[in-house]
Image (tube, helix red, strand yellow):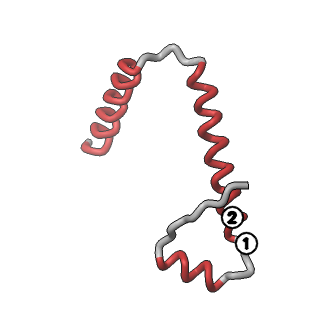
Amino acid sequence: MTNMTLAVPDDLHRIMKKHSEIKWSEVARKALWEQARKVELMDEILSHSTLTQEDVDEISELVKKGVAKKHHS
């Protein structure tokens, strides 16, 4: 298994030190696995997509305009 060094904000570090009974490396490992699974699923879904980057950019602009219109109404 590969080791990894992780920087955390001071506030988080204080909480982690206060709760040393928790295996924080296991918490981090589970969170990383969860995110990795989501990325892998996204890769699998996208591998079957026929959308081009141009299509994605166009859809993105339409969504942004729709959200902006909703919040400015």
Q: Position of residue 31 (x, y in %)?
A: 65, 56
At 73% across and 72% down in the image, what residue appears?
23
Residue 72 is marked as none
Badge 2 element = helix
Which residue has dot 2 on it? 27
Amino acid on which disc 1 is placed: Lys
Residue located farthest toward the left when viewing the structure as drawn: 72
Q: Nearer the viewer, residue 32 or 55?
A: 32
Disc 1 vs disc 2: Cβ atoms closer than 8 Å? yes
How packed mark 1 is, by other alpha carbons closer than 10 Å (few <14, some 14-19, many 20 or more), is: few
Quadrant position of the C terminus in the picture: top left
| 48 shown above or below 10 | above
Does 46 sit above or below residue 1? above
Instruction: Return the residue at label 1.
Output: 23
Q: Say above or below: 12 vs 52.
A: below
**Quarter containing the N terminus:** bottom right
Camera-nearest residue between 1 and 60: 1
